[in-house]
Each structure stands twice: as C-alpha cells, then as structure tokens.
Image (tube, rainbow, N blue to C red):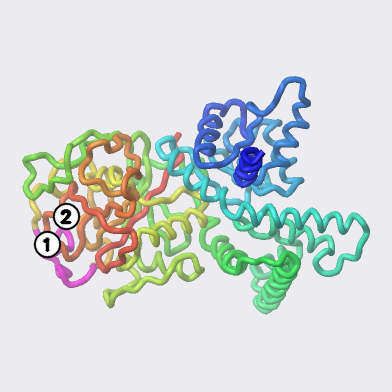
C-alpha cells in the first residue's frame, strides 16, 4: 500500500502534457513523446491511450481535461486536420494552457486564432531537436502547481456565478473572463485585450496622446486591482512574475508592435531570400542579418599552419545542409540598450570604451541568451547564438587560409594587439571599421570575442559534423571565437578557439546572433 501511495504521489507530481498532432506527423510525435517522457513528463497522446470499445471523442475529452498543458504540433497537415482543430477548440473551451510548437512552417493566417498571440518553440531544424526539447521542457514545467491551484480557483468562481451569487468586481462576468484567462495562461501570455483596451490602442495610434495616458493609467490600476484581489483570495502571489506580466502588457508588447511587427519577414519573402542578401526585422536597433549559403568545409587547422594550437584538431569535414542567417556585425550597444529599455536585458557597462556602434561588452553567456530569447519573442522567429562549426564556416567564407583575408596578417585588417590599426590594444573599434569577409560579415577576427552556443571541449574528437552545437560535457565553460582587441595576431586565425566560464563579463567578450531560415 505504501508503494502504491508513493507511486500515486509521483504520478501526480508529473506535469501532464496532451500532444495534439496530425496523423501525418506521427513520426515526429513519437520522438516528442519519448523526449518528454525522458524529461520526467507524463505525455497524453491519443494513439497510445485509446482502448478497444471506448468512445473515441469522450476519451480525447478526458485526456485533454487531465492535461496541465496542450502542446499543439503546428504543421500544414495539422492546421488542415479537423480532428486536431477540434482538440484545440475543446482545450480552449476549458481554458487550458497552450504550448504551440513549430514542426513544419505554416502561413500566419492558418494558425488557429487561440494560438496566434502566443510564442512558439521551433522544432523545424532536426539538428536542433534536443536543444528545442530542452526549451520546451523548461516552459512546460513552469509553475505547474501554481497553474493547477489557480485553475481550481477559476472553476470555483464559475460555480459561484452559476449559483446566482453576487459578483462584485472580481466576479462580474467580463472581469472574471479576463481573470481566468490571465490565471490559466500565466506566465507565458498576457490578458486578452477587452474592447475598451482595443479602443485605447486605436485612439493612441490616431495621436490622442492625452487619452492614451489616461487610459493607460486606468488600465494599469484595474490590472493591479485584479491581481490584488486574486492574491487575497488565493493567498499566494509571485511578485516577480506579476511584474513581468505588467511590463509585457504595458511596455514590451507595445514596443514590439511599434518596432517589430511590420518588419518581420513573411514566410514567402523568407523563402525568396538569396545567399548573401541582407534583411533586418525591426525599424531600428536590432541586428542586420546576412543569408549564409549551405555548403561544407574542413574545420580545424592543418599541421602545417603556423601558430596553431592543440585544441584545433582533428580536422574534420562539416556539412551545413541549409542556409541560415548571421548578423552582419557583432551585437552593438545600440542593439543591446533597446532590450534594456523594455526591461528584458540587464544594463551593461561600456568600461569607458563607448556605446552606440561600438560592440557590446561586459555580458556573460547567460546575458547573451537573454538577448536572443527577447529577440525571438519580439520577432516570433528562431534567433540564437551561433554554433562553433557554423561560426567557423561563416568566418572562413570559403577560404582555407589562416585568416579569412589570407595566410599572413598584413596591416589594418583587424583590431588586435599588433594588427596595425589605430585601436590596437587600446579599445574596441566601431563595428564595420575593417573590410568584410567574402560573405559580407564584419569583425569575424579581432575587436571582441564572440560567445558560442557550444560547451568547451579540448579537441574535436566526437564533435558533430552537421553544424549543430556541441552541448554535452562540462557546460560551465562555453566556447568563444574570433579573438579581441587585446590578443596577439595568432589568436585571430579562423581555426583558433578558446573558452570561458558562463558567468564571466569582460571588456573583451561580446557576441553576434544567428537565425534559422525557412527554405524552399
């Protein structure tokens, strides 16, 4: 009996995840099911859970009812599946929390309405499945107990109304709907805007600035009152999470609408991109991206290369199967400060070296992750740090020489200690101060080191050969590439590599970003 009770407690502690998918995507659903189980979740998936002589739809309803979160596998077949859409509609009627994931890209207009305002996790690159699964696992495990308890509160409130009891502020029907939506969607989404708020947005866009300020004040006050009432009834509150929700609703989302929404590439435009063309998905202060073509190269240095280090071996062929995008420059202080201005990134000191078009410095690896997460949230697109292999591929730009401009250092090709520039060993240089490589990327050698996604390994034995990040082993130390304004010239070679602890912040390390692309 004791063992049975322990098993029941363990099962109840697992987050229950209903997977909604098209039958044509079953192979992916199998892999996702296994990945979730391996990470301690309890997947609820109809192909395994429907038994003989059961009513099929009744069983599906029961599974969705048990679920803490509904994962909807977005693909062209899924959005065209009556069954999958019926599952989503039923889950929405129960106000379940949704976690949509992209398996195969679909047109914006085909995404079910209830999912359109949510952030997606991308699984469209098979090479990044495990990394995407980790992101999904982290999102799914967020405050499951909190969600369950507050969902029970929402059910109690509905029963109160159904019994005809007085409503007051909290139980007035429209306010209740907002409260339920906020409770069951938290912490991933914001409240569904009411007609009043929609009117406020329209008025602000028409230049009614006085009305904007007044209504924003009323909006925040009502929202705070709602939070306060919920806190008093339930007895628990997570202040930081509430602050994040308020910041999203009043600061970050308006910033996204004004600075990003109109500029994000549509799928057709993205598929039409040609190699070496550039694009930017914001009005200002975000990275300009260059399309890097697919291809293959030999990673590492030959034994004949002067100045080589022992961690650059063995040389091995890497195949990059699909085009991807890399930022034309290192992330600048102007880019970073835009993230800081909306509360998504911590402030970074410039050490007196300058801001604006100077490369960002004094950020740790986790800080860089905060930035790419924010950029992905603003655009709805999969921005990330580069993998070490894709960095070297992009830095070499088809060359096999020690530097991407040749076998010899020359003068005035980069900023380092002995490169012959006006900034050598003195300070960072403005991005783009030297000639670009053959892919149109600037400062891939010198100026500041660049954080990679990979964990550090002392050589390439066992390294991936498909361009994916190597994220096994000791990940307290991450790869940095490219060298900086303080290092000697041999460190600027395309094959040179180093590592540093994730928490370190220095005047020598920044980063640049990459983005997965939809391909024809």
Q: Locate residue 60, reporting x and y percent.
A: 72, 33
**At 15% from the left edge and 49% from the top edge, which residue is drawn?**
403
Camera-side mark, 1 or 2: 2
**At 63% from the left edge and 27% from the top edge, which residue is drawn?**
48
Q: Do callouts 1 and 2 mark residues in contact (Cβ within 8 Å)?
A: yes
Q: Is residue 254 magenta?
A: no
Which quadrant holds residue 510? Answer: bottom left
Cα distance, mark 1 to mark 2?
10 Å
Q: Locate residue 245, reporting x and y percent.
A: 61, 64
Which quadrant holds residue 516? Answer: top left
Write the start and end of the magenta stretch as one range: 411-428
**In the image, 334: left or right of 41?**
left
Specify the label residue 489 is tagged with. Answer: none
**Which residue sits furthest top?**
52
Q: Is residue 111 visible?
A: no
Q: Locate residue 498, reporting x and y percent.
A: 22, 53
Specify the label residue 419 is tagged with. Answer: 1
Residue at the spot of label 2: 492
Q: Is residue 515 above or below residue 206?
A: above
Mark nearer the N terminus (1 vs 2)? 1
Q: Secondary structure at mark 2?
A: helix
- Mark 1 packing: few (<14 Cα in 10 Å), some, or many (20+)? many
Q: Is residue 163 above or below residue 353?
A: above
- Residues 102 and 39: in front is 39
Which corner quadrant holds the N terminus?
top right
Numbered marks: total: 2
Magenta stretch, main secondary structure, is: loop
């Amino acid at each position: 009996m004791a063992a049975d009770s322990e098993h029941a407690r363990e099962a109840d502690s697992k987050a229950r995840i209903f997977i909604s998918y098209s039958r044509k995507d079953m192979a992916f659903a199998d892999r996702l099911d296994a990945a979730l189980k391996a990470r301690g979740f309890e997947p609820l998936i109809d192909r395994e859970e429907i038994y003989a002589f059961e009513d099929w739809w009744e069983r599906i309803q029961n599974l969705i009812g048990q679920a803490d979160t509904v994962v909807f596998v977005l693909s062209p077949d899924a959005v065209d599946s009556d069954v999958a859409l019926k599952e989503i509609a039923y889950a929405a009627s129960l106000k379940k929390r949704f976690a949509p994931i992209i398996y195969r890209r679909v047109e914006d207009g085909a995404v079910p309405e209830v999912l359109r305002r949510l952030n997606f996790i991308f699984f469209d690159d098979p090479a990044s499945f495990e990394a995407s699964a980790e992101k999904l696992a982290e999102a799914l495990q967020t405050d499951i107990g909190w969600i369950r308890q507050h969902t029970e509160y929402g059910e109690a409130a509905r029963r109160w109304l159904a019994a005809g009891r007085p409503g007051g502020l909290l139980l007035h029907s429209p306010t209740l709907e907002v409260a339920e939506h906020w409770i069951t969607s938290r912490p991933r989404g914001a409240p569904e805007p009411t007609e009043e708020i929609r009117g406020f947005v329209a008025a602000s866009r028409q230049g009614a600035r006085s009305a904007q300020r007044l209504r924003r004040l009323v909006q925040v006050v009502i929202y705070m009152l709602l939070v306060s009432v919920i806190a008093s009834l339930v007895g628990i509150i997570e202040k930081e999470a509430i602050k994040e929700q308020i910041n999203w609703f009043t600061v970050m989302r308006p910033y996204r609408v004004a600075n990003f929404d109109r500029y994000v590439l549509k799928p057709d435009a993205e598929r039409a991109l040609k190699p070496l063309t550039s694009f930017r998905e914001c009005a200002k202060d975000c990275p300009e991206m260059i399309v890097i073509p697919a291809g293959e190269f030999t990673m590492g240095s030959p034994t004949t290369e002067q100045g080589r280090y022992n961690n650059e071996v063995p040389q091995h062929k890497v195949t990059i199967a699909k085009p991807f995008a890399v930022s034309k420059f290192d992330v600048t202080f102007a880019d970073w400060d835009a993230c800081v201005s909306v509360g998504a990134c911590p402030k970074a000191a410039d050490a007196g070296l300058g801001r604006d078009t100077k490369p960002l410095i004094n950020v740790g690896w986790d800080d860089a992750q905060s930035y790419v997460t924010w950029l992905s949230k603003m655009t709805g697109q999969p921005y990330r740090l580069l993998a070490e292999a894709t960095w070297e591929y992009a830095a070499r730009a088809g060359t096999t020489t020690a530097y991407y401009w040749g076998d010899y250092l020359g003068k005035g090709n980069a900023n380092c200690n002995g490169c012959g520039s006006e900034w050598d060993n003195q300070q960072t240089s403005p991005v783009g101060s030297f000639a670009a490589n053959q892919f149109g990327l600037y400062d891939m050698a010198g100026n500041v080191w660049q954080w990679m996604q990979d964990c550090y390994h002392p050589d390439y034995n066992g390294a991936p050969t498909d361009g994916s990040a190597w994220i096994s082993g000791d990940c307290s130390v991450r790869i940095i590439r490219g060298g900086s304004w303080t290092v000697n010239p041999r460190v600027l070679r395309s094959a040179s590599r180093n590592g540093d602890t994730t928490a370190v912040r220095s005047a020598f390390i920044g980063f640049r970003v990459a983005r997965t692309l939809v391909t024809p």
